[in-house]
Image: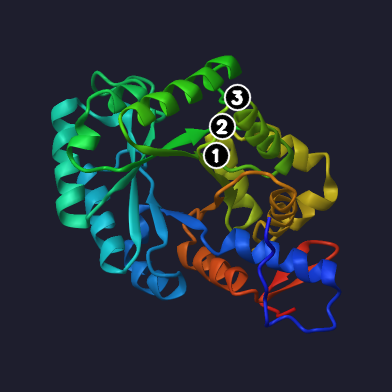
C-alpha cells in the first residue's frame, strides 16, 4: 500500500508516526456519514464541512414516511452531497410503492445509489421480507440505480444465524453482479476492531472482493452509544468494552472512534482490503461532520492512550 505524503506534518516527527498519521488521513478522507430525516435543517452546514460529493446515507426510522426520505434526499443533493437512502424491504407495501419511491428519488434527488436492508419490522408490510427480494424485482436497474449497498453484520444478527447471514451475503452479491450493479457492504457499527477484521478476511477468503465500508459510531456520549447499541443488537462489542476498562473509559463524554480508526488504519496498511469507514451520527450530524473534516485534513495528534486527539496538528 502506498503511504500518502502529508506536508503539514513537522519534519522532526518520526517516520513511523508520520506513516501512521497518513494512513489515518487516507482512511477517513472518503468517509460516508449516516443521518436521519430530522437532520435535514443541518445539511447546509454539513455541506460546508464535507468534500463535495460525499455520500450521505439517509436512515429509515420507525413510522417514517417515504416522502420524508425523499425530501431529505433532495436536500442532501441540493447541498452538493450524494444521497444514499435506506430502503427497508419490509416497509414496502409492494412493487408499486417501490416503483413510485424510486421515481421520486431519481427525478427529484438524482439518486443513483441505495442501501437495501431487510428492516426491523416484525411482519412485512407487503410481499418483501428480505432485501434480495427487492433486488429481484428489476425495478432498481429500470430506474437507473447503479450501485447497491448491502448490510454486513460482522458480529452476527440477534435473529439470524451466522451461517444464514454468510450465505445471504454471497447470494445478494452474486445476484447484484448478475444484474449489473456495483455492489458493496456497509457494516453495522461496532466498538471492537477484531470482529470487523476477521469478517473482512472471511469475505476475501470466500472470493468476495466487493468494496466494504466499516460502520463506526461517530462522536457521541456513552449513554447515546449504549442506547443505539442495544437497539441494533451490537451485544458482543458491549461485552468487549466492559472487559476492557481502558476502551470503555474512552467512550465517556463526547469522543469519537479514534482508537478503532487507528487499529483499522494499521490493518489496512498491512493489506486489509477495505474501501473506507461509515460513521453513524446518532443525531449529531454536524459533530460527526466536523470530526470527519478534521481527521481528513490531518488535524489531530497521535496519542498512546487514545489513538489520537482530534483538533490538534501533528
Q: In the image, is 280 to the left or to the right of 156?
A: left
| Residue found at x 64% / y 66% | 25
Q: Residues within 10 Å of mark 3 (few under 14, many from 20)?
A: few
Q: Which mark is residue 97?
A: none
Look at the image and tell me in which quarter the N terminus lies.
bottom right
What element does badge 1 sit on?
loop
Q: Which residue is mark 3?
A: 206
Task: Say which quarter of the image contains residue 314.
Answer: bottom right
Q: Are marks 1 and 3 in contact (CB under 8 Å)?
A: no
The answer, for residue 155, to whether it is visible in the render is no
Q: Earlier in the sequence, mark 1 or mark 2?
A: 2
Q: Nearer the viewer, mark 3 or mark 2?
A: 3
| Residue found at x 22% / y 28% | 138
State the residue in front, 167 or 146: 146
| Residue found at x 23% / y 36% | 141
Q: Position of residue 100 (x, y in %)?
A: 13, 38
Q: Are marks 1 and 2 in contact (CB under 8 Å)?
A: yes
Q: Nearer the viewer, mark 1 or mark 3?
A: 3
Q: Earlier in the sequence, mark 3 or mark 2?
A: 2
Q: Residues within 10 Å of mark 2 (few under 14, many from 20)?
A: many
Q: Which residue is mark 1?
A: 188
How far apart are the alpha carbons under marks 1 and 3?
20 Å
What element does badge 3 sit on?
loop
Q: Which mark is residue 153?
A: 2
Amino acid at each position: 500500500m502506498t503511504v500518502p505524503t502529508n506536508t503539514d506534518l513537522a519534519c522532526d516527527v518520526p517516520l513511523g508516526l508520520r506513516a501512521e498519521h497518513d494512513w489515518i488521513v487516507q482512511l477517513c478522507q472518503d468517509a460516508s456519514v449516516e443521518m436521519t430525516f430530522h437532520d435535514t435543517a443541518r445539511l447546509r452546514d454539513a455541506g460546508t464541512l464535507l468534500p463535495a460529493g460525499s455520500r450521505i446515507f439517509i436512515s429509515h426510522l420507525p413510522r417514517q414516511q417515504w416522502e420524508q426520505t425523499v425530501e431529505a434526499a433532495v436536500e442532501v443533493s441540493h447541498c452538493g452531497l450524494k444521497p444514499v437512502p435506506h430502503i427497508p424491504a419490509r416497509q414496502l407495501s409492494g412493487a408499486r410503492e417501490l416503483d413510485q419511491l424510486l421515481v421520486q428519488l431519481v427525478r427529484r434527488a438524482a439518486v443513483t445509489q441505495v442501501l437495501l436492508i431487510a428492516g426491523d419490522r416484525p411482519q412485512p408490510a407487503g410481499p418483501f421480507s428480505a432485501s434480495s427480494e427487492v433486488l429481484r424485482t428489476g425495478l432498481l436497474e429500470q430506474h437507473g440505480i447503479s450501485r447497491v449497498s448491502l448490510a454486513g453484520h460482522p458480529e452476527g444478527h440477534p435473529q439470524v444465524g451466522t451461517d444464514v447471514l454468510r450465505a445471504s451475503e454471497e447470494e445478494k452479491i452474486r445476484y447484484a453482479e448478475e444484474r449489473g450493479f456495483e455492489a458493496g457492504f456497509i457494516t453495522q457499527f461496532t466498538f471492537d476492531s477484531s470482529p470487523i477484521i476477521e469478517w473482512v478476511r472471511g469475505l476475501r477468503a470466500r472470493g468476495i472482493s466487493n468494496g466494504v465500508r466499516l460502520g463506526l459510531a461517530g462522536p457521541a456520549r456513552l449513554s447515546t452509544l449504549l442506547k443505539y447499541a442495544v437497539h441494533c443488537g451490537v451485544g458482543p462489542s458491549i461485552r468487549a468494552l466492559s472487559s476492557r476498562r481502558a476502551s470503555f473509559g474512552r467512550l465517556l463524554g463526547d469522543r469519537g472512534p479514534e482508537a478503532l480508526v487507528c487499529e483499522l488504519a494499521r490493518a489496512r496498511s498491512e493489506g486489509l482490503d477495505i474501501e473506507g469507514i461509515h460513521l453513524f451520527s446518532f443525531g449529531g450530524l454536524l459533530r460527526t461532520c466536523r470530526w470527519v473534516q478534521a481527521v481528513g485534513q490531518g488535524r489531530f495528534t497521535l496519542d498512546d492512550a487514545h489513538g489520537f486527539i482530534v483538533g490538534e496538528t501533528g
